[in-house]
Image (cartoon, grey):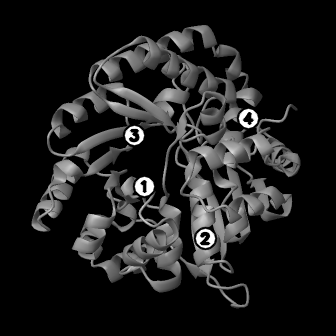
Amino acid sequence: MRQIITHFTDDDLYKFTMCCAVIENFPRTRVKYLFNDRDDTIYPEGFADLVMEQVAMLENVVITDREIEFMKRKCLYIPSWFYGYLKGFRYNRGWVRAWQDETGRLHIEFEGAWSETILLEVKVLAIVSELYYMVTGDDRKFNYDAYYDSSYRKARRLIEAGCVYSDMGTRRRASFKAQDVVIRAMKDCSRDVKGPGCFVGTSNVYFAMKYDLVPVGTMAHEFICAIAGMYGPLMANHIAMSRWSHTYRGALGTFLYDTYGWRIFSLNFSEDFANMFKGLRIDSGDNYQQLDKIVEKYRSLHIDPSTKQIIFSNALNVDKAIELQHYARGKCQPSFGIGTHFTNDFDGIRPRNIVIKLVAVKITESWPFYCHTCKLSEDHGKYTGDPETVRRFRETLHLQ
């Protein structure tokens, strides 16, 4: 079977930025991750073995000088020592275990040093998604010429509506080629169509390099989840903001706040942090209600919310983004990160509803036990973690 991931930077920027922050702040931390198929899919027989074949192929994927030169040019906030680390980085199939149970459901676990296993998540999700369509034959339904046209129309509508937006669709893309077609269409449209909006880039570093775009992204929930596992959820956001600002000195200043819901984040979001970070990302809950809470919080701190960037990334499509653009105009500086709707929107194809989440952590390798952690976003359907850990964290955070 052909190798699905062939480029080291065929990955989201936030994995590299978090990896750098982990090395600087938590160099000896070890973690565990678990795969979750929210649709409870029964996978074809032997699928897990094919996943492990693809994971083994990652061992021959190394970063190139061209990729390093591009990141140095576009990602000035990443310290130069990190590229030496990436130059020597090698994937190891021993970090991964994949199997199917007697019903055919897929299970995947990662375990190892956080600084190493952190670079598996996006690649393995992209492998599972594309591999599924290859094995089932659904990939024969992909009409890439028509997909270019539909992607171009999406871009035109967003630009004409004044939306500042980016592609964030690597993890659950239909295929590598699908994402390539989308980004090419988006760039072509941004060249051809003049309007108040713009296509600002992609979270995928390889495609940003291929099309000379800006790689976009900051962090994921796992950064806060791991800290909560080590130190508790009450101050996890505070510690995360402190460590992040220590590493990036004001760059990458958009904070993902909803790991444990708005209430505890708001209590941690003091005036110094509100001034330090240029904005927040909304990734769960009702987008309109969340924006109103953010605006109210900034005003309570005597900060003009219209000076702050708010990134919407919660299950967006073009229609939802345009509606939010109208609502948010004047309240903040809105922008939009759109994923599956861009890279897995073929007729007759059901996108994979899959995630890989960090579920356990220990501060150093010498600890004899792991501490479990979880995510408690504004949507209960996006909770991750075992039920007992979820219950314990909810009690600690005084959540209903």
Q: Secondary structure at mark 1?
A: helix
Query: Cβ–Cβ below 8 Å for labels 3 and 2?
Result: no
Alpha-carbon span between mark 1 and mark 3? 11 Å
Which residue is the site of mark 2?
Answer: 22
Nearest the camera: 59 or 367? 59
Nearest the camera: 121 or 88? 88
Query: Cβ–Cβ below 8 Å for labels 1 and 3?
Result: no
Amino acid bearing label 1: Lys
The dot on residue 315 is 3
Please tell me in which quadrant of the rendered image residue 313 appears: top left
Alpha-carbon span between mark 4 and mark 1? 24 Å
| Above or below: residue 254 compared with residue 197 | below
Which residue is the site of mark 1?
Answer: 382
Question: What residue is at 55 percent from the left and 13 percent from the top?
Answer: 148
Q: Which badge, 4 or 1, is on the more N-terminal residue?
A: 4
Query: Cβ–Cβ below 8 Å for labels 4 and 2?
Result: no
Alpha-carbon span between mark 3 and mark 2? 28 Å
Q: Which badge, 3 or 2, is on the more N-terminal residue?
A: 2
Residue 14 x %, y % = 55, 53
Amino acid bearing label 3: Ala
Which residue is the site of mark 4?
Answer: 131
The N terminus - image quarter: top right
Residue 77 x %, y % = 53, 57
Question: What residue is at 15 percent from the left and 61 percent from the top?
Answer: 303
Q: Secondary structure at mark 4?
A: helix
Q: Which badge, 4 or 2, is on the more N-terminal residue?
A: 2
Q: Secondary structure at mark 3?
A: loop
Question: What residue is at 78 percent from the left and 60 percent from the top?
Answer: 97
Q: Is residue 310 left or right of residue 224?
A: left
Q: Which badge, 2 or 1, is on the more N-terminal residue?
A: 2
Label 3 CA crowd tier, 10 Å (few <14, some 14–19, many 20+): some
